[in-house]
Image: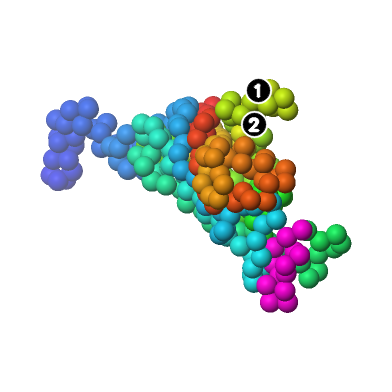
Amino acid sequence: MIRKMLVVAAAVAMPASAIAAVTTVSASGVAGAAAKVYTSQTCAISGGVTFAAPGLALNGALGKKATVSSSSALTASGTGCGAGTSGSTAVKSKIVSTATDCLTAPAPAPAGCALATSKVHYLYDTTGSLATSGVPGIVASLSKGIKLADNGNKVTGTVTLAGTAAVVGGACGYDTSAITPTFPLGTPNIGFSISGNTNVTGLTYSVVLCITGDTGTSTTNHFSVDYLAAAGGNAGIQIATGTFGGASSLTFTKV
């Protein structure tokens, strides 16, 4: 009885603010901790993609394996925004795509298969492969979600085929250094968009990846210009890497 009276007396003497601090539990489940706040915001993105060696070309390259891998890394910058809680941690992914088996490809076989042998007969990295395998490759590489951060809070965005698309012009804009009669606004920048829900109720995200710069054989540091020239018949261009730039961004929307 005496012990019970002492507990009651201590509670009466305790300031109301102290009682609130002890009894308040935040969304994270830690007593006295502040609740996490998620916000609508947009961050810039940097990084790029490294294509399977030796790089994208009109007729591609021949190898011994049925699958090949490209790699991608992006970093979003902004206060408490982006990839990692401080925006400084890169999101890395390995993009696996299926090569064309020249020995079983239906006629007419791709031009790059002309030099195929019984030992080296898998064709990859053609300019056309970016269009056909780019989206499914990205979705497969991020099947566990994309790790991001909003307002300093770690979140995971879901990646689905329905929420991923190739972008030509549109949100990625145009490269005005290459204005032609065919492209009076400039060459359309090429990239991909990824959007969907996160593991936080009411918080969605969208990522726009615009490949603007590049490196490689006979490249000009203008990805869309070089890619379209290669796809159009210039077999001397070989694009080893692409750089994210221009309108590349990460946007969170809190509803």
Report if residue 117 lies within the magenta region. yes
Closer to us: 224 or 135 = 224
- Residue 12 lies, with reference to residue 73, above or below; the image says above
Q: Secondary structure at mark 2?
A: strand
Q: Is residue 145 visible?
A: no
Report if residue 65 lies within the magenta region. no
- Residue 59 appears in which quarter of the rendering? bottom right
- What's under tag 1, amino acid-wise? Leu
Give the magenta-colored segment's residue range: 111-123
Q: Position of residue 111 (x, y in %)?
A: 77, 58
> Pointer 1: what residue?
185
Q: Are marks 1 and 2 in contact (CB under 8 Å)?
A: yes
- Residue 219 lies, with reference to residue 106, above or below; the image says above
> Pointer 2: what residue?
188
Q: Position of residue 97 (x, y in %)?
A: 64, 58
Q: Residues within 10 Å of mark 1 (few under 14, many from 20)?
A: some
Q: Residue at x 68, y 22 (%)?
A: 184
Q: Residue at x 81, y 64 (%)?
A: 105
- What's under tag 2, amino acid-wise? Pro
